[in-house]
Amino acid sequence: MVLAWTLALLLAQPAPDGARGPTESPEPAPIPDAESDRVLSFFGLLELEKDPEVSDEEKVRQWKAFLERTERQRTYARRAVERWTFAERRRLLERAVRRDPGDAPPEDKHRLWREVAEAFGEDTREGRRARDRAGHWKRRATQRRVDAAMEIEREGRPKVDRIRAWKAVVEWAPSSKSGKAARARIRTLQARLVEEAQSLDGFARIDDATRLRAWRQVLAGDPTPDQARRARRRIRELTSAESNPKSDGP
């Protein structure tokens, strides 16, 4: 099985020192069988202190018993944290190993392995291996986005569609080589949208509706702040011109 070494490694690990199995519990404290051995809560002890009928020796005894009970509870709580942390780590690892060879999207597999790495800590052997596996699926997911964008390019789809496809690469892996190349491609496509809109403005025979569509394409792509301001201004001007057409005379 894929990554069987990782699962075998974890299953071979003993539970943390002092931790029992997930379904086991520590030995219960003895149940007092005498009224004098009744268990008092913290607030019960505070009330006991106010009772003048109770001797100082009894108050001391009750507070010592409270401290003993508290220490037993703290010991159990520490072991419970270790026990359930161990169980959670194993559950996460088993799920990641089980999903790794399947048909789940690489994005999901990347997320599962990142959860394993975070659970173990990336400074541990298990955490480093999980991180490497997460990196593998990160690259696979990136390549899938690149392939989809290249297919859209080959189909000759509109520039806005191409920009959106390349933005998916940038958003997923912004610092990767693919992400940087995608960002450069987006800038090129966006510049062409602006050039086309500006060129249409230079031809008197082009109707305003066509110009309006071109500037809206600029805005629908991935414009810089300056390009977005110019596009919004031209859209307002052209929309106003459509709403108030020039009169041809009386």
Image (cartoon, grey):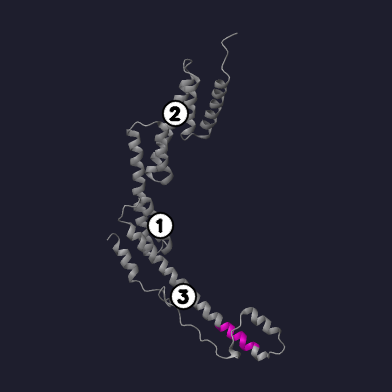
Which amino acid type is marked by label 2?
Leu
Q: Give the extent of the magenta segment.
A: 59-68
**Vertical arrangement, residue 162 with respect to residue 5, above or below:** above
Q: Which residue occupies 31% across, 67% down?
A: 8
Mark 1 surroundings: few (<14), some (14-19) or many (≥20) residues within 10 A: many
Residue labelled with disc 2: 193
User: Quick one: quadrant of the C terminus?
Assistant: top right
Q: Work out how far the residue at label 1 is from the one at label 3, CA to CA, in angstroms.
A: 26 Å
> Is residue 60 magenta-colored?
yes
**Vertical arrangement, residue 230 with respect to residue 34, above or below:** above
Q: Position of residue 119 (x, y in %)?
A: 43, 63
Q: Which residue occupies 41% across, 59% down?
A: 115
Residue 180 image-quadrant placement: top left
Find numbered disc 2 in the image and state the secondary structure of the residue it sits on.
helix
Which amino acid type is marked by label 1?
Arg
Residue labelled with disc 1: 114
Q: Position of residue 222 (x, y in %)?
A: 47, 35
Mark 2 surroundings: few (<14), some (14-19) or many (≥20) residues within 10 A: many
Instruction: Give yes or no for contact between labels 1 and 3 (Cβ–Cβ under 8 Å).
Output: no
Which amino acid type is marked by label 3?
Arg
Instruction: Give yes or no for contact between labels 1 and 2 (Cβ–Cβ under 8 Å).
Output: no
Residue closer to the observer: 2 or 95:
95
Instruction: Give yes or no for contact between labels 3 and 2 (Cβ–Cβ under 8 Å).
Output: no
Q: Which residue occupies 43% across, 60% down?
A: 118
Identify the disc placed on residue 79: 3
User: Quick one: quadrant of the N terminus?
Assistant: bottom left
Residue 68 image-quadrant placement: bottom right
Name, please, the residue furthest toward the right: 52
